[in-house]
Image: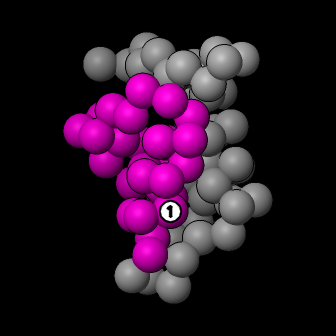
Amino acid sequence: MNHSERSSYVADRLKKLSPKKKDGVIRSIEAMFQFGGGIDSSEVEKVIATLQKQKFFSIAPDGRVTYTKG
């Protein structure tokens, strides 16, 4: 799974889970990959950065997550 596919996979699942804090987003992403060999923290950060660039969500300095794509 390349980075673009991984980002889409994560976005589809985060839509349903909609964690409200950044640490919840991180834990959710880690859980998505726990049975497939895991995902390292740098890749989690890359996926989060990609989703923010795509305006899927924004993360405030205090960690609150706001979803912008329906």
Side of 59 relative to 61 (left or right): left
Residue at 54% from the left image edge and 77% from the top image edge: 38
13 in the magenta segment: yes
Residue 33 versus residue 36 in the image, above or below: above
State the residue lying farthest toward the left: 16
Residue 23 position by quadrant: top right
The chosen color scheme is one colour
Side of 20 relative to 38 (left or right): left
Residue at 68% from the left image edge and 37% from the top image edge: 49
Task: Specify start and end residues of the magenta stretch as a single range.
Answer: 5-34
Residue at 59% from the left image edge and 70% from the top image edge: 39
Which amino acid, mark 1? Glu
Residue 11, can we see it? Answer: yes
Tag 1: Cα neighbours inside 10 Å, few (<14), some, or many (≥20)? some
Residue 13 versus residue 3 in the image, above or below: above
Residue at 29% from the left image edge and 19% from the top image edge: 70
Residue 56, can we see it? Answer: no
Q: Position of residue 31 (x, y in %)?
A: 42, 64
Residue 22 versus residue 44 in the image, above or below: above
Residue 42 position by quadrant: bottom right
Q: Position of residue 51 (x, y in %)?
A: 56, 35
Residue 20 versus residue 66 in the image, above or below: below
Reading the image, the residue beneath label 1 is 30
The one nearer the camera, 43 or 17, is: 17
